[in-house]
Amino acid sequence: MLCLTLTGSTLEENRNLVERNRQWISLAELRMDYLCADEQKIASSFPSTVEIPVILTLRRVSDGGKCNLPEKQRLQLLYETAKGDFSYVDIEDDVKKSDLKFKDPLFEQKVDFEASMKQRGMRIIRSYHNFECVPADIYGKISKLAAKGDIPKVAVTPKSMIDIISLFRIQEELKEVKEKIVIGMGDFGICTRILYKKCGSMLSFCSDTKAAPGHLSAQVMSELYRADTLNDKTHIFGIIGNPVLHTASPMIHNPGFEAIHYNAVYVPFLVDSVRAFFKLADMLQIHGFSVTVPYKRDVQPYLGRITREVKQIGACNTIVRIQNMWKGTNTDYYGFMAPLSSEIATGKIHSALVIGAGGASRAVIWALHNHGIKVTVINRTIEHAKALAGETMSTYDTLENCNRYSGAVDLVVQTTNVGMAPHLGENPVPDFVFSGKEIAYELIYQPKETSFFKRAKEAGCRVISGGEMLIEQGKLQFEAFTGYHYPHWIEPEI
C-alpha cells in the first residue's frame, strides 16, 4: 500500500490532495498538526468525505511534526477527533496507557482511549521516530511495540549502508510480526521506501510536499518505481554512487522494464561503502547495477570478470550477476561514441580537446584514442592532466591555455561538473572561442543547457548533450541487465 501524507492547512485542501493522487494511493494520513486551529475542530468529519481509509496523526514537534500543544491537551484533541470514521490512529510509543484515559462529557467516568478505538474497529499504530540514527536495538523495539497488540511503526534515520542492511534484515528477523511499518528516512533511506516490502513493511508513505525526509511523490512511487506492485519475483537493479539521488537513470530503465513487461525495478542506492553494498546486493539478490562517481574503480576488486574496456579504461560503470559471480563492463565507452558514429565513420574528426581529467574523461579519451583521434587533455591541475595523458597516450595542457585550441580542433568534450549545481552559470573554459565548425559535446545533462552549451550553440556548432550519452549507455546497460534490446517505441524523458 502507498499512503499519502496530507499536509494541507484545511480539510478542503487535503480532499483535493487525495483526489489528485487517488489513482496511485490506497490510503491517506491526515496530519492534524498541519491543520489550522479552526479546521482541527472539525477534522473528525474528514474520513467520511474521501473514499479511502485514513490514518489520524497529530505529530509532536519532537517527532518531526508541528504540534506544540501541552501533551495532555494534544492527546485530548486526538481522542476527540478519533471519534470520526478513521481506520487507524497513530500514537507515539512513549505515550503511557494512563495518559490515554479521558473524561468524556457523554460518560460519567473516564474513558479508555485505546479500548474505545479498538471496540469501534479502529487499528492503533504505535510509532517510534529517530531522526539521528538507526538504534542498535531496532528489532527489540519493534517486538516490544508489537507485543501490545498494535501495529508497530519505526521511522529511523540510516546514515550508512550498514544501517540499510539492518533495515532490510527486519523482514527475516521479525517474520512473526505480520503487520509492521518500517521507514528509513533521509537520503540513505530512499531505497527502503521504494523497496518497503523487502523490509517487511505493510506500507510506504509519500507526499507532494516532502512532509518527511526522503518522501517521494505518490506518482513517482507508483508510476516510475511501481513500488506497490513489486513482489518476491521482481528482479532488483539499481545504481550506486555518492551523491546519486540526482540520477536520471531510473527514468531510462523503469519505463523500459514496463514496456517489455519485465518484472524488475531500478532503484538508486546512496552508498558510503562498496563492500557493504555488495553484502546488501547478495542479501537482496540484486541482479545488476550501474556505478557512478566515486566508485567506478572501487568496485573492481569485487568482480569475478571484467571486460577489455574496463581493463583499458580502469573504470567500471555496469555490473551484472552471472553464474554466481559479478561481471563488470563499461557502457560509457560505447554510449559516448554513439552520437558521433556518423562523423567517426566518415573520418570527419581528427583531433579533440577534452576538458577535465577526472573519472568521466577516462572513458572518453580511450574511446577517441581507439578510433585514431588525437586527444589533448586540459585541466586546472596540470599534474592530473599530465598523469591521465601519460596513461592514455595523449597530450596535455592547463585550462588557462584553452584559447590556444580555438579553431584548431574538430571536437571539444566538456567532462567536468562546472555548469551543474552548485556551479550553475559557470563555464570551465570562458576564454575558449568557438569557430562554429567544432562539435561541442558536454557530459552534463542537468541543466540541459549550460553556459558552455549555449555558447557553442550560439556559435553555430553541432552540440551534443550529456543526455544523449546517458540514454545510449543506459540502453546498453538495459541489454546487459535483461538480455533484451531497449524498446525502440519509447523515448526516455530525462
Image: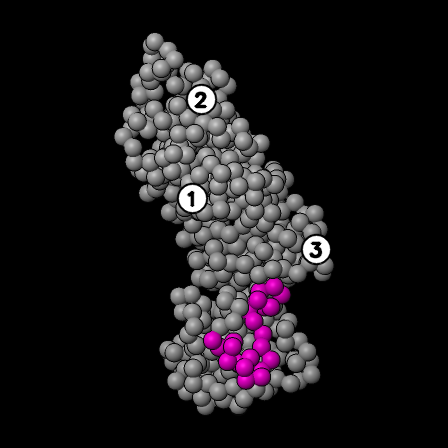
How far apart marks 2 and 1 lie (CA) works out to 25 Å
- Displayed quadrant of residue 197: top right
Q: Residue at coordinates 27% horizontally, 30% vertically from top-left?
A: 70
Residue carrying label 3: 484
Mark 2 vs 1, N-terminal side: 2
Q: Position of residue 175 (x, y in %)?
A: 50, 28
Q: Is residue 257 left or right of residue 410?
A: right
Q: Give the residues in magenta.
A: 451-472
Of labels 2 and 1, the one closer to you: 2
Question: Which element carries disc 1, helix, strand or loop?
Answer: loop
Farthest front residue in view: 38
Q: Which residue is mark 2?
A: 83
Please name the amino acid that badge 2 sits on. Lys
Q: Are marks 1 and 3 in contact (CB under 8 Å)?
A: no
- Residue found at the far top of this picture: 108
Q: Quadrant of the N terminus?
A: top right
Instruction: Say which quarter of the image contains residue 263.
Output: top right
Residue for badge 1: 211
Badge 1 density bin: few <14, some 14–19, many ≥20, Cα 10 Å = some
- Magenta highlight: main SS: helix
Instruction: For residue 268, say whether it is visible.
Output: yes
Reading the chain from its start, which is encountered first: label 1 or label 3?
1
Identified at 38% across, 78% down, the residue is 380
- C-alpha gap between disc 2 and disc 3: 55 Å
